[in-house]
Image: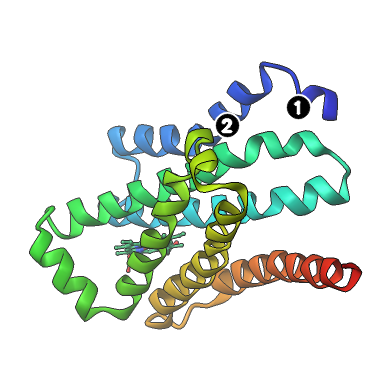
Amino acid sequence: MNKWLLQPSAKPFVFTLCLLPFIWLLYRALADQLGANPQEALIRATGDWALRFLCIVLTVTPLRVLSKTPSLARFRRMLGLFMYFYALVHFLSYSGFDMGFDVNDIVSDIAKRPFILVGALSLLLLTPLAATSFNATIKALGAKRWQLLHKLIYAVAGLAVLHFFWMRAGKNNFAEVAVYAVILGTLLGWRLRQFVRSRAKS
Ligand code: HEM
């Protein structure tokens, strides 16, 4: 496994895999296969993919440690940027389809609807993470400050689940929200345990 992940073709392969949901959505949109309300379907599907990628990114470190596969770390940045990509497409779909790209309407909707405010906050917190995921910015920030900044991902995870929960609260439909909350809670719990253990050792 470790050997395969180090192959030059592994990164383009994972990149293509990550792009497939977007290509599939684009195809279905162009082929008019998104159902009775294609705009809503696009907004929801891109929101779902942003949340799925968040779970995938947070799985990389536990998987790397537990399976003793250090080369998995090579894919973390790409997966994180794909998460940001899907969150951005989600926001742009909402801005375009629901708000007609009217900045005043978007701002007043953010102020009016708490679940939109929470989604906007999580996207806002994601932006410095995406912007500082390149070698030059990591170098400029210094490893310690970069690591500290990237702890924001825990706040992003909490806000993303709250955003989803609040959206579904109106429909009293919490099954999927509970699945994501358990996955993210387990992943964050694992990190917390590692942190406590490393503190106890030092
Ligand atoms: C400015 C930022 C954001 C805005 C304006 C926004 C807006 C929306 C809107 C309008 C919906 C659909 C509501 C409906 O159909 O009733 C939605 C759903 C959703 N959003 Fe966001 N969102 C934002 C950020 C995020 C982020 C960062 C994530 C994930 C990391 C996310 C994940 C989701 C999920 C999972 C859904 C539910 C999809 C479903 O029902 O299957 N959103 N969002």
Q: Position of residue 82 (x, y in %)?
A: 49, 41
Q: Which mark is residue 60?
A: none
Q: Position of residue 175 (x, y in %)?
A: 58, 74
The amino acid sitting under disc 1 is Leu
Q: Which residue is mark 1?
A: 5
Q: Residue at x 54, y 66 (%)?
A: 157
Q: Residue at x 49, y 48 (%)?
A: 83
Location of the C terminus (image quadrant): bottom right
Please tell me in which quadrant of the rendered image residue 112 appears: bottom left
The amino acid sitting under disc 2 is Leu
| Real-space Cα separation, disc 2 to disc 1, in angstroms | 14 Å
Q: Residue at x 45, y 70 (%)?
A: 164
- Depth order, front residue of 37/76: 76
Please tell me in which quadrant of the rendered image residue 172 appears: bottom left
Lower position in the chain sequence, tag 2 or tag 1 = 1
| 76 is higher (above) or lower (below) than 10 | below
Name, please, the residue furthest toward the top.
8
